[in-house]
Every structure is written in structure tokens, then in C-alpha cells.
């Protein structure tokens, strides 16, 4: 089997503390086939390994909007979807390509729009603390962890 390529890390988006961090084996190459994702945990850090069209990429397994696990979402080429608010992020740049909404998932897994119970039309934006908190919630760019393959092991630079 040919070792997968490493997706280039977008400029300025290296996760803090990783520039001088030591590499740790977190998975085997066979654990993350092309087009798939894998959540791994090292200490209290949850990481998301993704085998994109451009190679392996590693970010925290947290949506940069409200920290939902991206590993429950979907990988589509070089873009990953958040399962909670349907945000979409471009792994080539770290940027948001579809902004998250405040709708949610129904019990059957279907999506309903902002401020609407399942099957109901959207409600007007509330004028309370919740609405102000929503307006102040920022969507950050993804942060990346250096990754390499040694033999069959996928290794990630993990800060001490």
C-alpha cells in the first residue's frame, strides 16, 4: 500500500504549541481510508483525522462555531460538515463555506430551520439574552496539527 500524502496546512493556521511538539502515533494508515474520518483522543485532546482528496489532515474534533464533534459530520472531498448546525468548512483554507445556523436535528435525524420546532415554520428571532449570545458567537477558522506517516503509523504533533 502506498502511504497517503499529507494535505498542506494553510498558512497561519497551525494549532498553538505544535511547532515544536513531538509526534505521537495515534492510528494506523488502514484506520482512515480515503474519504473517511476518525476521531482519536490523546490526553484531553480530541483530534479528527481526515483522509481528504488532497491527503491526510488533522484538526481538533470540534466545530469552530460551538464545539460540536465534527467526526459525527460528513467529509466531502476537502470540506467537512458539522452535524449540529450544518456549518461547512473548507479544509484547504480553514475557512467557513456555509455558515452554521441555529436550527437543529429532529429525532429522525432530519434538519429543521432556525427557531422552529420540527414541522413548524421558522419563528422570529427572539429579543432576549439567547439572541444576543447568538449574535456574539463567532465562527473561527479551523486549526491544524502537523501529521506524518511512519511505516503504517499515522503520527500527529501533539503539544505537551
Image (cartoon, grey):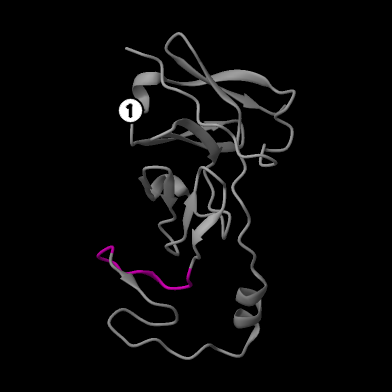
Local crowd at mark 1 within 10 Å, few (<14), some, or many (≥20)? Answer: some
Q: Check the image and report above or below for 91 versus 19.
A: below
* Quarter of the image where one finds residue 22: top right
For the magenta stretch, what is the residue range?
101-109
Residue marked by disc 1: 33
Where in the figure is residue 62, as x and y percent of width and height?
54, 49
Q: Depth check: 33 or 107 in front?
A: 33
Return the residue nearer the eye: 110 or 142: 142
| Relative image position of residue 2 (x, y in whole percent) | 36, 13
Which residue occupies 61% across, 61% down?
Answer: 139
The dominant secondary structure in magenta is loop
Find residue 158 and report its image quarter.
top right
Residue 124 or 19: which is nearer the viewer? 19
Residue 96 position (above or below residue 79): below
- Where disc 1 sits, the SS reads loop
Q: Residue at x 56, y 60 (%)?
A: 66
Magenta span has 133? Answer: no
The picture places residue 118, in percent across and down from the top left corner, at: 31, 78
- Against 85, is 147 above or below? above
Point out the image quarter for the C terminus.
top right
Which quadrant of the figure contains the N terminus? Answer: top left
Q: Given the current orientation, which residue lies at the most extreme left position?
A: 108
- Which quadrant of the figure has residue 65? bottom right
Amino acid at each position: 500500500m502506498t502511504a497517503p500524502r499529507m494535505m498542506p496546512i494553510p498558512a497561519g493556521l497551525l494549532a498553538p504549541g505544535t511547532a515544536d511538539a513531538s509526534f505521537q502515533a495515534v492510528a494506523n494508515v488502514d484506520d482512515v481510508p480515503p474519504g473517511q474520518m476518525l476521531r482519536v483522543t490523546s490526553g484531553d485532546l480530541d483530534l479528527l483525522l481526515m483522509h481528504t482528496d488532497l491527503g491526510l489532515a488533522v484538526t481538533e474534533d470540534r466545530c469552530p462555531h460551538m464545539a460540536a464533534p465534527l467526526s459525527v459530520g460528513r467529509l466531502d472531498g476537502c470540506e467537512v460538515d458539522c452535524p449540529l448546525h450544518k456549518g461547512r468548512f473548507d479544509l484547504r483554507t480553514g475557512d467557513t463555506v456555509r455558515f452554521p445556523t441555529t436550527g437543529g436535528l429532529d429525532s429522525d435525524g432530519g434538519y429543521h430551520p432556525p427557531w422552529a420546532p420540527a414541522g413548524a415554520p421558522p419563528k422570529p428571532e427572539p429579543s432576549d439574552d439567547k439572541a444576543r449570545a447568538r449574535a456574539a458567537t463567532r465562527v473561527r477558522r479551523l486549526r491544524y496539527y502537523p501529521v506524518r506517516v511512519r511505516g503504517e503509523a499515522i503520527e500527529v504533533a501533539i503539544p505537551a
